[in-house]
Image (cartoon, rainbow, N blue to C red):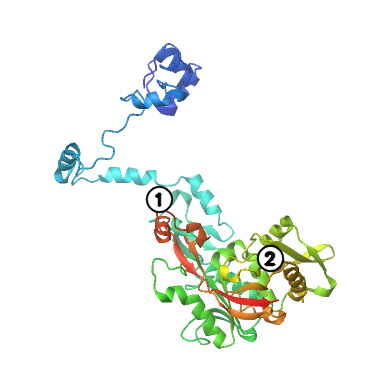
């Protein structure tokens, strides 16, 4: 673009800067005074039109229907001549397709020159400031030894990093480094960072006799972490590697429940922790592990607590902070209060399945993090039973997620085992889990088609035990 005031030639932002710097004019003001000479108005109603990049629209927003009917580059949107047509149905498109195929295509047999490839490569290279900021995001773990001036490629160049913990020097591409590549000494091949963190946490509880990657207890299957003195095992399930990942074999779907049942045959209680749970709800996971190992420090007797009704706001906040599955809407909610602080909560809802019509379901039960409420469930169950009778419910229903145990605590409260559900599942992109109902089929596509379009795969749990208490 050439300036009508001084013949300065430039384009885009630079031209706008020139106008403001040399002529003290904004681009819109310059366009009116020195291009159009007058203030443009809508050709239909006379209102002011929209200004875009040194041009004014011919019609205002209110007259957009008129604009869409006027063809030509300056006249607004016109219906494309080839809309809805293909080379099979239109001779003009067929002729164009034939002309451009094979050697008729101007790009046929051509490739970028060495000079052009280098120029493209340079445009993809990060500048020093951006590189430094990306490296600094993991500055607690690594020092970058390669000089910033030597950086040339994010994917093809290996940079030298020094582990701050063990001082091991390893080479990684910037892409691998940004994606979480770990020190090969601190994190040996075959183990994940989350699994190592769980192992270190268990050690911090003064637990001994811990085995990693054990293949003896349930041979030939492997257990990630086996705490032998407690007959407790922990599986760390990374969302990407433990999802179906496009493979729909029976083994992929049942791998978690099969391992749980193999452990149960050896009197080993297996806990499954998904990687997103450890990443996003680590405090809850640690509290659960401590409780199962009998290492919870704060112990309270339920008889010293007061039974209270819990408001919706208190319920939502409590389960969001203390339950691995978070909050779900409920019909009624009771809690135990100790020193004016709620330390345990149980919520009730109407069962979803019709076969349990007339019963009331325990939706959530949880104690406060790092607190063991001795007799807490039994104390709250007395309140639940009274509520069920007063509300004319025929019985009480609850589910126990087998990823965390068999729910034997319900047996001591009078429940009987009524069976188990099928395998539960979620959808994942490798980073987060989505409830399967969020990928529900609709008029236009099936659940499978929608998951494929969103690039999601299934990841299965272990199902749940069903416990029933009749009134």
Above or below, 13 against 408 in this view is above
Task: Indicate the quadrant containing the C terminus: top left, top right, bottom left or bottom right.
Answer: bottom right
Q: Secondary structure at mark 1?
A: loop
Q: Which residue in the protein does label 1 denote?
A: 152
Say which quarter of the image contains residue 329: bottom right
Q: Which residue in the protein does label 2 denote?
A: 348
The residues tagged by marks 2 and 1 sit, at their Cα atoms, a distance apart of 60 Å
At x 76%, y 61%, the residue is 310
Judging depth in this view, the residue of 230 and 142 nearest the camera is: 230
Q: Secondary structure at mark 2?
A: strand
Q: Which mark is residue 250?
A: none
At x 83%, y 70%, the residue is 305
Q: Answer yes or no: do the residues labelled 2 and 1 have beta carbons within 8 Å?
A: no
- Whether residue 145 is visible here, answered yes or no, is no
Percent coordinates x, y for residue 371 in the rendering: 75, 70
At x 49%, y 17%, the residue is 25
Above or below, 179 against 190 in this view is above
Of labels 2 and 1, earlier in sequence is 1
Task: Indicate the quadrant containing the N terminus: top left, top right, bottom left or bottom right.
Answer: top left
Judging depth in this view, the residue of 85 and 391 nearest the camera is: 391
Percent coordinates x, y for residue 226 in the rendering: 58, 81
Q: Residues within 10 Å of mark 1 (few under 14, many from 20)?
A: some
């Amino acid at each position: 673009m050439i300036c009508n005031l001084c013949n300065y030639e430039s384009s885009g932002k630079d031209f706008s800067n020139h106008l403001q710097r040399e002529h003290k004019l904004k681009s819109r003001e310059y366009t009116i005074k020195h291009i159009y000479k007058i203030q443009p108005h809508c050709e239909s109603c006379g209102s002011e039109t929209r200004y875009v990049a040194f041009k004014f629209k011919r019609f205002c927003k209110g007259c957009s229907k008129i604009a869409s009917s006027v063809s030509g580059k300056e006249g607004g949107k016109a219906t494309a001549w080839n809309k809805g047509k293909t080379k099979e149905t239109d001779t003009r498109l067929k002729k164009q397709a034939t002309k451009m195929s094979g050697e008729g295509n101007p790009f046929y047999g051509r490739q970028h020159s060495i000079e052009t490839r280098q120029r493209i490569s340079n445009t993809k290279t990060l500048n020093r400031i951006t590189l430094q900021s990306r490296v600094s995001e993991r500055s607690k773990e690594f020092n970058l030894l390669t000089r910033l001036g030597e950086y040339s490629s994010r994917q093809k160049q290996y940079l030298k990093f020094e582990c701050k913990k063990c001082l091991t020097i390893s080479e990684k591409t910037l892409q691998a480094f940004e994606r979480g590549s770990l020190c090969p000494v601190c994190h040996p091949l075959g183990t994940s960072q989350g699994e190592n963190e769980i192992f270190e946490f268990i050690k911090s509880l003064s637990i001994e006799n811990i085995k990693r990657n054990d293949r003896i207890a349930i041979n030939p299957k492997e257990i990630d972490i086996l705490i032998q003195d407690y007959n407790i095992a922990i599986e760390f399930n990374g969302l990407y590697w433990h999802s179906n990942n496009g493979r729909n074999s029976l083994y992929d779907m049942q791998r978690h429940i099969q391992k749980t049942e193999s452990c149960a045959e050896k009197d080993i209680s297996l806990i499954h922790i998904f990687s997103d749970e450890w990443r996003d709800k680590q405090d809850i996971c640690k509290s659960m592990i401590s409780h199962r190992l009998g290492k919870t420090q704060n112990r309270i007797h339920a008889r010293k607590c007061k039974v209270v009704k819990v408001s919706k706001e208190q319920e939502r906040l409590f389960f969001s902070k203390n339950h691995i599955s978070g909050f779900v809407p409920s019909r009624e909610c009771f809690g135990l209060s100790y020193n004016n602080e709620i330390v345990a909560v149980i919520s009730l809802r109407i069962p979803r399945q019709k076969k349990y019509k007339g019963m009331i379901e325990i939706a959530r039960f949880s104690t406060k993090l790092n607190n063991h409420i001795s007799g807490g469930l039994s104390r709250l169950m007395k309140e639940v039973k009274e509520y069920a009778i007063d509300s004319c419910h025929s019985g009480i229903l609850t589910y126990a997620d087998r990823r965390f145990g068999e729910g034997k605590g319900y047996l001591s409260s009078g429940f009987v085992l009524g069976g188990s559900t099928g395998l539960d599942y979620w959808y994942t992109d490798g980073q987060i889990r989505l409830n399967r109902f969020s990928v529900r089929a609709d008029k236009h596509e099936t659940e499978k088609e929608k998951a494929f379009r969103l690039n999601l795969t299934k990841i299965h749990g272990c199902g749940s035990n069903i416990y029933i208490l009749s009134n």
